[in-house]
Image: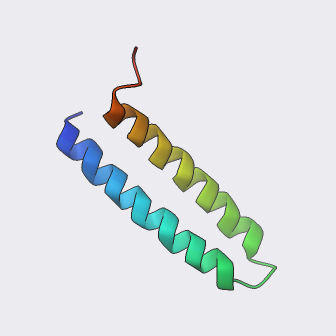
Amino acid sequence: MSIRLLAKDLYRYQKEVERLERELAIAPAAKQPAIAERLRQAKAERDLLRRALDGEIGR
């Protein structure tokens, strides 16, 4: 995968994490676990992409 595509995906996941954090802050208690799980997944994907761009994957 090219660096440009990785960077685009990283940016997209950073924005998704920010959106989910805002959503979690105002969500009713009943919806918080589902939002927190989506946030956890988005953070994991964001961190994976960040490590890939930093060259830490595959070494």
Q: Is residue 17 left or right of residue 33?
A: left
Question: Hey, which quadrant is residue 11 in on the image?
Answer: bottom left
Extreme-top residue of the structure: 59
The quadrant of the rendering that contains the C terminus is: top left
Residue 14 point in image, percent of width and height: 42, 59
Question: Hey, which quadrant is residue 57 in on the image?
Answer: top left
Extreme-front residue of the structure: 54
The quadrant of the rendering that contains the N terminus is: top left
Residue 13 point in image, percent of width and height: 42, 57
Residue at screen point 57% across, 78% down: 22
Question: Hey, which quadrant is residue 38 in on the image?
Answer: bottom right
Q: Relative to residue 55, is residue 36 depicted above or below?
A: below
Q: Relative to residue 23, is residue 34 depicted above or below?
A: above
Residue 35 point in image, percent of width and height: 66, 68
Q: How is the image coloured?
A: rainbow
Q: Relative to residue 36, is residue 19 depicted above or below?
A: below
Q: Nearer the viewer, residue 21 or 42?
A: 21
Residue at screen point 32% across, 36% down: 53
Q: Is residue 2 left or right of residue 34?
A: left
Extreme-right residue of the structure: 29
| Number of callouts | 0
Q: Nearer the viewer, residue 30 or 48?
A: 48
